[in-house]
Image (cartoon, helix red, strand yellow):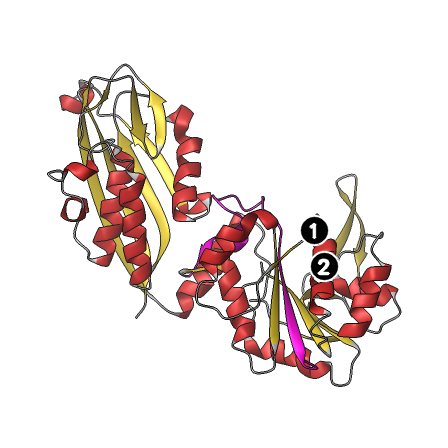
Amino acid sequence: MNGCAALIVAAGRGRRLGGGSPKQYMQLGGKAMLRRTVEAFSTHPKIDFIQVVINASDKELYVKAMEGLAIAPPIAGGKTRQESVRLGLENLESQMPKTVLIHDAARPLIDAATIGRVVDALVTERAAIAAVTVADTLKREDAGHIAVTIDRVGLWRAQTPQGFCFSEIIEAHRQAKNTKFTDDAAIAEAAGIPVGLVSGTEANFKVTTADDFVRAEQMVADSKGLLRVGQGFDLHRFGPGDHVMICGVSIPYSQGIEAHSDGDVGLHALTDAILGAIGKGDIGTHFPPSDPKWQDVDSTVFLQDALTRLNESGGRIHNLDIMLICEEPKIVPYRDKMLSRIAAITGLPESAINVKATTTEGLGFLGKKEAIAAQAIATVVLPT
C-alpha cells in the first residue's frame, strides 16, 4: 500500500461511562460513537486504509454501527489497549503502510485538520502526536495537601491520533510486549524514536465519564440541529395478576395490569413522547389495541419502533424524563434497574435519563390504588 493507515482502537469496555452498551457503540449525535470516529478518518483524503480493533464479543454491535461503511473487517483485540494496538499493527503488516495513525475510538470529535497535521508531520518526523499545551497550574499532592507546584512551561497533554513510521512502531510494540506503557508515544520513546508534537484541539477529548458524554452531546448539538420536545401520558387500571411491568422492569405486586399489551405505562409514555417530538402521531396510531397481534406484547417493541422512526428522521435523543404516578408499588427500590433498562433500549447514558415517582396523596382513582399512570418528556435534536 505504501500510504497512511489509520488504526482505530475500540476494544475497551468503557465501564466508567455507564449505559447499556460499551461506550463506543452509544449514540452520539444520532450515530454510534465509533462510527463518528471512523467516518472522520474514512473521509480524509490523506488516509488510505482503516483497520478497527474491537472486543470479540462486540461483533454484532460493530456490524450494526458500521452498516454501509466500506472498510476492512474488524479484528479482535487483546486484554489491554497496548495488546490491542500490537495485534492491530500485526494485522496491518500485510498492507505494509509507510505510516500509521493510531487513534482511540473514544475521541469521536477528532477533526480533519488535526488528522492532516499529524500526517504531514510524518514527512519529516519519525513520529508525531496531537497534543495541547497545559493551561492549568499543576500541583503534586501528598497526604491530601499540596506538596509542590509544578512548572507547566513546556508541558503538553497527549491526545490521539499518534502517528509513526509503520516499520518502526510495530517493532517497538513487539519489544514492549511485556512492559506496560501509557500510550504509543511512550513505547516509541522507549525504543529511541524521537516524537514530534503538533497542535490538537480541546474538542478532541477522550469520552470517559458521563460528564464527558454530556459535553460531547452538547458540542454536537451546538454544531447543528433543531431542538424539539414531546410529551407522553399513559394510564392503566390494575387487574388480576402477580406483577406489573414498569419501564421494562417486572415488579412483584398483588395485582397485574389490565391492558392489551404488557401494560408498561413508563415505556408507553416514553414512546408517545418521542413520537410527539418528531410529529409521528401516537402509540395507538401505530399499534392499535384492536389488532390482536399486539396482545400481551413486550412494550419494548413500541419504544424501539419510535426510536427507529427517530433515527430515520436523522434525529437523536438528548434526554428523557419519566414521572410515575401511583400509591403502589413502590418505585424507589427499582429505579436503578429502570434506568439501566431504558439505557439499554435507547443507547443513552443513564445520566441522560431520569425516572421519578409521586403519589396523589390518596386522592382520586390513582390514590385509591385502582390504577397507575406515567408522564414522560423527550427532548430530541432533529436536523435543520
- Residue at 87% across / 66% down in the picture? 191
Question: Residue at the spot x=70%, y=82% of the render?
Answer: 2
Asked whether 341 or 212 is in front, the reply is: 341
Looking at the picture, how far across and down is residue 130, in whole percent? 68, 71
| Mark 2 crowd level (few <14, some 14–19, many ≥20, 10 Å Cα) | many
Q: Which residue is rendered at x = 57% and y = 67% of the image?
A: 72
User: In the shown orientation, is residue 278 left or right of residue 14?
Assistant: left
Residue found at the very far top of the displayed protein: 254
**In this rendering, position of residue 127 left or right of residue 279:** right
Q: Nearer the viewer, residue 309 or 186?
A: 309
Please provide percent x and percent y for residue 337.
Answer: 43, 32
> The disc labelled 2 sits on which kind of residue?
Leu
In the image: residue 266, left or right of residue 288: right
User: What secondary structure is marked by label 2?
Assistant: helix
Q: Which amino acid is tagged 1?
A: Gly
- From the viewer's perspective, is residue 283 above or below residue 329? below
Q: Is residue 230 magenta?
A: no
Range drawn in magenta = 1-29
Circles 2 and 1: CB distance less than 8 Å? yes
State the residue position of label 2.
87
User: Which of marks 1 and 2 precedes in the sequence?
Assistant: 1
Q: Mark 1 points at which residue?
A: 78
Q: Quadrant of the N terminus?
A: bottom right
